[in-house]
Amino acid sequence: MGMAGMLTAPVVSAAYLVGMVLLFVELNAPSSTTTVIAPFFILFTAGGMIRLGEAQLDLFKCGVLACAALVLTFLPISGDIFESARGSIVFAHGPGITWQLMRWYVTLLALPFALLFLARRFPVSLQIHADYSYGIYIFAWPIQQTLVFQAARFDIALGPRTLFVVSAILSFGCAFVSWHLVEKNALRLSRTKVSFTAFRKRLRAVIRLARQWGTDFPTALSTINGLQPLKLGKILRPFSRSSKLMAPDLPRNRFGRLADDISPRLRGE
């Protein structure tokens, strides 16, 4: 869908709303679809809707309403009020819906907005240069499934809290290894490729203009609009030893002298 350009804010929002309506209709008929698949789908589309539509969506108001809904839902007296009024409230299921199901549904509806609202306003911000979030996202589910399978296989009691703690520790460990061995190096290679491509295009343009105007390399370089001199200067010196790659018809020694001459100027030395 992403490659086809279908993951737009209206499409994701429509999928989220349809999912919430269909889940409510089937709320009192528990199945693997309503208890596992539908919640994952709704939480995923909710995050996509908020991200794609954040320019039009007032996250502050939505977050305040979501937090208020969660607080009211988990108040001890809320269940009693709901049970006493259940017979006179018209639901899609009539009076058969229970308070536990309604509280679960409201939590599923409000949780994405409340989490993002609180995360943006959390008073403590940890300055972590490494990004382990993607690794945790990737490894958490298979680790949880493996733990559940092995616990059932060896008849080990594994409650939700124990599963959460053990899977969190293992997921973070895998994410740590993945970031330092794979992800960080892959990102560095991608940035190097982009810098090399930009450098090659701009350097060829400068050499061509210098020859057309009969001027020197630094003067032609200063005439190119949109250059980022600092970034270009940092990578200019290593390429001074690769003149055959960047400019085959330019003498190697002349190119090296020009690169060595212009690099300090670009770095502000």
Image (cartoon, rainbow, N blue to C red):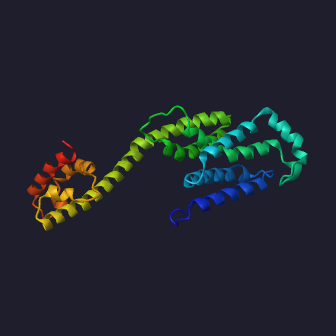
Q: Where residue 104 sits in the image (x, y, percent)? A: 74, 44
Total marks shown come to 0
Drawn side of residue 10 relative to residue 250, left or right: right
Tell whether 257 sits left or right of 232.
Answer: left
Extreme-right residue of the structure: 87
Left or right: residue 146 versus residue 204 is right
Q: Depth check: give the residue in front, 267 or 129.
A: 267
Q: Position of residue 242 (x, y in %)?
A: 17, 56
Q: Is residue 213 above or below residue 260?
A: below
Left/right placement of residue 177 relative to residue 56 reads left
Rendering quarter of residue 178: top left
Residue 219: horizontal and vertical position, in percent? 15, 57
- Residue at 87 percent across and 40 percent down: it is 83
Report x, y in % for residue 264: 17, 45
Q: Quadrant of the C terminus?
A: top left
- Which residue is rendered at x = 53% and y = 37% of the image? 170
Against 242, residue 165 (above or below) is above
The residue located at (63%, 58%) in the rendering is 13
Give the quarter of the image for residue 128. top left
| Position of 169 relative to 20 (above/below) | above
Quadrant containing the N terminus is bottom right
